[in-house]
Amino acid sequence: MQDSKKGSLPMLHSINLSKTQSPSTQEERDRMIKNILKYLRRTKEMFLVYEGEEELVVRGAMSWKSSKQETIADSTTEAEYIAASNAAKETVWIKKFITELVVVSSIADPVELYCDNNGAIAQAKEPKGDMKICRIPTDENLADPLTKSLVQRKHEAHTRSLGIKDMSDWL
């Protein structure tokens, strides 16, 4: 993880906007700046917390990545399939690693990989034994706070589920 320290924020240091994404009027720029400042004010007391190995393996995020995709995709389905494929490779590696460490006796069941794109799921539905790809409704996709803006209530629920907690909960 980038800047992985207790209390660091999971944010990229440089975020680039394309010309089409940039605000074109002063009013749009002002609104964008206001929204960024509101977000920063609301989240200034948040940090990422990992609680114990068992929690990590059973319910928590084992790894995450936020970066530009290396391959240019021709469609959203292809982009989601590439991301799911990369996640599947890492998950299989982690599963084998944990099994070799004898942290658990064996992980016989396939690991569930969640994806919210039906086209990507259809392409990936080829049983191999290590993975089971599952449809996740967009409303339940915990990766959304890392990829898009959400209403405050949904953002707070998803970040809580990811293990991002308000510092006042710990003080």
Image (cartoon, rainbow, N blue to C red):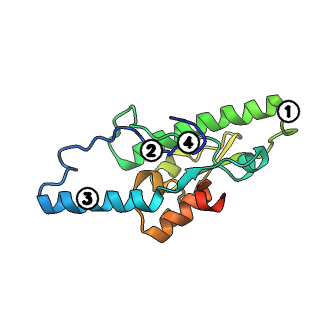
Q: Note whether 42 is above or below 76 in the view shown.
A: below
Label 4 element class:
loop
Q: Residues within 10 Å of mark 4 (few under 14, many from 20)?
A: few
The residue type indicated by label 3 comes to Met
Q: Which residue is mark 3?
A: 32
Q: What whole-number distance in Å separates the C-alpha atoms at marks 4 and 3?
A: 27 Å
Badge 1 crowding class, 10 Å Cα cut-off, few under 14, some 14 to 19, many 20 or more, is: few
Asked if 120 appears above or below 94 in the picture, the reply is: below
Report which residue position mark 1 lands on. Answer: 102
Q: Nearer the viewer, mark 4 or mark 2?
A: 2
Q: Which amino acid lies under the numbered mark 2 shown in the image of this protein?
A: Met
Q: Amino acid at mark 4?
A: Trp
Q: Quadrant location of the N terminus?
A: top right
Asked whether residue 46 appears in the rendered view, the answer is yes
Q: Earlier in the sequence, mark 1 or mark 3?
A: 3
- Of the two numbered discs 4 and 2 on the same chain, state the one appearing first in sequence: 2
Residue depicted at 70% across the width and 40% down the height? 130
The image quadrant of residue 79 is top left
**Is 47 placed left or right of 107 in the picture?**
left
The span from disc 1 to disc 2 (Cα, nearest Å) is 34 Å
Q: What is the x, y in percent for residue 134?
A: 60, 55
- Is there a contact, CB below 8 Å, between mark 4 and mark 1? no
Given residues 70 and 9, the one toward you in this image is 9
Contact check, label 1 and label 2, Cβ < 8 Å: no
Determine whether the residue tagged by mark 3 lies in a helix, strand or loop: helix
Q: Which residue is mark 2?
A: 11
Q: Which residue is mark 4?
A: 64
- Measure the C-alpha gap from mark 4 to mark 2: 12 Å
